[in-house]
Amino acid sequence: MRPIVLNPLFAALTSLSGIGPKLEKLYARLLGRDDEAARVIDLLFHLPSGYVDRRNRPKLSEVTPDTVVTVEVMVERHRPPPPNRPRAPYNIDTCDPHDDTHTLTLTYFNARKDYLQKLLPEGETRYVSGTTKLYDGHLQMVHPDRVVDEEGFAKLPLIDPVYPLTEGLHPNQVHKAIEIALERLPDLTEWQDAAWLKRNGFPGFAAALRSIHRPADVADLDPESSAWSRLAYDELLAGQLALALLRGRMRARPGRGTAAEGLLRARIIKALPYSLTPSQQRAVADIIADLAQPNRMLRLLHGDVGSGKTVVALLAAATVIEAGRQAALMAPTEILARQHFATIKPLADAGGIRVAILTGRERGRERPEVLAALAAGEIDLVVGTHALFQDDVAFHDLALAIVDEQHRFGVHQRLALTRKGEAVDLLVLTATPIPRTLVLTYFGDMDISELREKPAGRQKIDTRTLPLERLPEVIDAVKRALDAGRRIYWVCPLVEESELVDLAAAEDRYKDLTKRFGGILELVHGRMRGPEKDRAMRRFADGEARILVATTVIEVGVDVPEASVMVIEHAERFGLAQLHQLRGRIGRGAESSTCLLLYKAPLGDAAKSRLAILRETEDGFRIAEEDLRLRGEGDLLGTRQSGMPGFRLARLEIHGKLLSTAREDAALALNRDPNLNSPRGSALRQLLYLFGRDEAIKLLRAG
C-alpha cells in the first residue's frame, strides 16, 4: 500500500481547480502519460526549461526582436477585425509612455473584444510580457504571456520559469496549475542523511521543488543548483535502491552450480580462425566462475562493434551443455537471430553441440518438431526471438538464458525466459558500449564484463564526410570500388518519401543505383517479409549482389567480411552510436575499408560534433561517452521508445557524478535494514513510490 501521506501527490490532475477533462488530455500528453491519467506529482516533476528575467525592463527603443521581454506600454487604440473577416487578427496599438515615437502592436487571434477592452483599456498603462518580432518593419508581440497593471506587476515574480508546453496549453494555465500543486506538497519524513545534506548544502525535498518552481534568482533554475541536484540525487537513489533490491532478491534465490571440464569449449576455441582476445578470455573465465556458484548469475557483457560477444556467449553455453543442460539465446529481431545462428552453427557443429533456431517464421511441421526436440533435451542450444518465451515453448532443463540487446526487451520479457527453467543463470549482451553512468543506472543489478579489444586482423576504417551535393562523385567512387572487386553497403534513413522529412528513401536510391549498375543490387528494409530479407542478405553474402541498399536493419549483427565500403546518406540524421554500429559492418575482412558519411548542408552544431568524433576515433567506449554528453540517457539506450524508465529530473550528463554515491548509499541502507523497516527505511519506501519504483516494494513484500 502506498503511504497515505503521499495521496495528495498521486491524486489526478482533475483534482486541481481549473483542470477539466479537456485540459487533462493535454496535460497527459505534455507529461508523457498518454495511456494513464496525469497526477499532481507528474506536474511538480515538470521542471522549467528556461526563464523570463523581469529585473531588467528595457524601453521600447531598446527591445531586440525575437527576444522575450517585459515592457511598460500605453494603450493607444484597439483595431478589431472587420465584421466580414472574423479570422483576421485583433490588433492593439501601444507606445512607450515616456516616448510615443516608439510603438508596439499587440496581436491576438480568435479573441473576444469585450475581454481585450477590459484587459487593455485605451489610455491606460500596462506591463506586457512575451516574445517580440518584427512584422512589416513594426515591432509586434503575438498573444502576450502576461498583461498586468501597476499593482499586478508588483506581484509578478521577477524571475518567471518557462515550461515546455504542448499545443493547446497556455503558459499561464501551467503556471497556475503548478502554483496550486505546490500548495498540496505534504511534509515528508526526510530520507536523506542530515549530515550529508548539510555538507552538500542541499535543501529538503519540498523546499527544493518550491525553489525551482518559484525561483528567487536565475541560479535556482540551473540544473547544477543545490535544489535541482538534491532532486536529481533523490531520483538516482530511488533507481539504485530498486536495482539493489532486484539484485538482492535474484541473488537470494538458490542457483544450481554448473561446472564442466571445458572439453566442448576447447573444441570451439580450436575451430576459431583467430585466438581469443585477453578481454574475451577474462569474460569467459568470469562467466565460468559465476556458473559454478550456487547463486544465480546476472552478468552484462558489453563491448565494441565486432569485439566477439557471440563467441563468448557460445563458450558460456558450451559450459552448461557439457554438464548435460540447455541454453537459449534471445535476440530482438529475426534478422539478428538468424545472423547469430549463422555465426554459431559451424562452431557448434565443431564442438558437437546440437543447435536450432526458433522465430515467428518457423511454422507448419518445422515448429512442432523443434518444440518436441527442445522438450526432450535433443536440442542443446536454441537461438530465437521473443518466440522463445511463449507458453508452448518448454525446455528439458534450461540452465542459461542469453539475452542480446536487452534494452530492447522489457525486464518482464527477460525474466519470462529465465522462468523456463529452474534457477536459470542470465547473461545479457549488448553491441553498444555503454557509458559507466548508464551501466550503473540500468544494469546496476548485474556484474559487468567489458570487451575492449577487437579480434586480430580487424582493419582500421578510413572515415570521411562529404556534402550530399557531391553525390555524383560518390557514385563514381562506388564504380571504381566495384571494378576493384569490392562489396558495398549503402544505408538510407527512411523506407518511403515523407512529406515532412526530405530524405532520400531506400527504395528510390535502389532504383537510381540499379539504373547505373544493373542487377548487382539488393534492397533490405524493415517492412520486407523475413524470407525476402534472408534471400537478399544471402545474395550479398555470397557475392551475387555487390551493393546492398538498406535501412538501419543492418545496424547490428550483420557480418559479411568481404564488404569494405559503407555509404551512409543523411548521416546528420543518425545518432552517434548508431553511426558507429553501421560503420562496424565493414573492416571485418582483409581489405582496407572506407566509410563515407554524406550530410545535407548546413550542419547544426550537434551534427558537426557527431561527425567530427567519428572521423577522430573508432573507440566505441569513447564514442558512447560523447553520445551521452550530446544526447542524454533516454535517447542513447532507446528508453524513450522501449518503455524503460528514463529520468524526469536527473540529467546524467550533469548529475552522473552523483551516481556512485547513490549506489553506495543504497547498498549501505539495505545492508543495515534489508526490509526497509527502520524509520529511514520507511522514508526510503516513500522515495521509491515518489519516483515510480514501487515494483521494488513488491519485491520486499514477496520476501
Image (cartoon, rainbow, N blue to C red):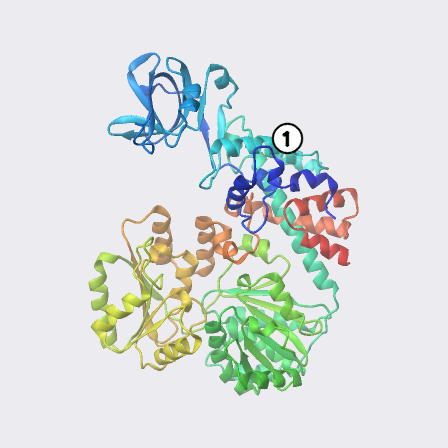
Q: Nearer the viewer, residue 326 or 596?
A: 326
> Which residue is located at x 40 percent, y 14 percent?
125
Where is residue 338 drawn, in percent x and y?
48, 77
Q: Which residue is mark 1?
A: 183
Query: What kind of residue is marked 1?
Result: Glu
Q: Residue furthest right?
A: 678
- Say if 100 sits above or below 347 in the image: above
Q: Residues within 10 Å of mark 1 (few under 14, many from 20)?
A: few
- Say if 379 sits above or below 506 in the image: below
- Say if 287 sits above or below 7 in the image: below
Q: The residue tagged with tag 1: helix, strand or loop?
A: helix
Which quadrant: the C terminus?
A: bottom right
Say which quarter of the image contains residue 235: top right
Say which quarter of the image contains residue 126: top left
- Say if 430 sits above or below 138 in the image: below
Q: Nearer the viewer, residue 25 or 527?
A: 25
Where is residue 516 drawn, in percent x and y?
21, 72
Q: In the figure, is residue 181 to the left or right of 119?
A: right
